[in-house]
Image: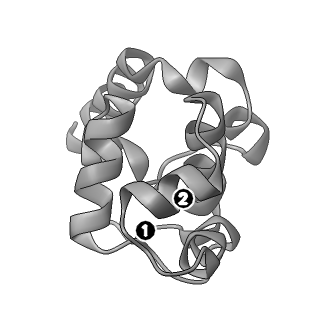
Amino acid sequence: MYKNIDMTKTGILLKETIKKGGYTVKDIQKILHLSCPQPIYRWFRGNVLPSVDHLYVLSKLLGMHMEDLLVTEQDDISLTELCIDRILDHKWLYEYRTRLCVKECA
């Protein structure tokens, strides 16, 4: 069974990760060659997801895997957890998801 992406939590994750990476919305707008910042704010609100191209660039910029920038509905991550400093520790996120997969596959 495929997991659905939780757009609201993904938006919060993107916002916090970009912020903690030291980038502003204006910086991301320039890097992604967007004519206006509105798409970025739509991502942050969970209205839409970034395109695969934009997600790829963000992952390289932030030094994370693309899938680590997405939160699925089955990821038991609270909104509080998304806002803490360790979210940039993608090793923690990878280990968390690995443990989750082991539980689901068992």
Position of 14 relative to 6 (above/below): above
Position of 62 relative to 78 (above/below): above
Kindly check if marks 1 and 2 are in contact, taking CB atoms under 8 A apart as contact. yes
- Give coordinates of residue 52: x percent, y percent: 23, 69
Residue at left offset 62%, top offset 74%: 46
Residue at left offset 74%, top offset 47%: 79
Q: In the rendered image, which quarter contains the C terminus?
A: top left
Write down the residue under mark 1.
5
Badge 1 element: loop
Write down the residue under mark 2.
10
Front tag of 1 and 2: 2
Can residue 104 be seen here? Answer: no
Left or right: 67 with respect to 47?
A: left
Tell me the amino acid under the disc marked 2. Thr
Position of 93 relative to 27 (above/below): above
Can residue 4 be seen here? Answer: yes
Is disc 2 surrounded by few (<14), some (14 to 19) or many (20+) residues within 10 Å?
A: many
Residue at left offset 35%, top offset 34%: 97
Which is more toward the observer, 91 or 16?
A: 16
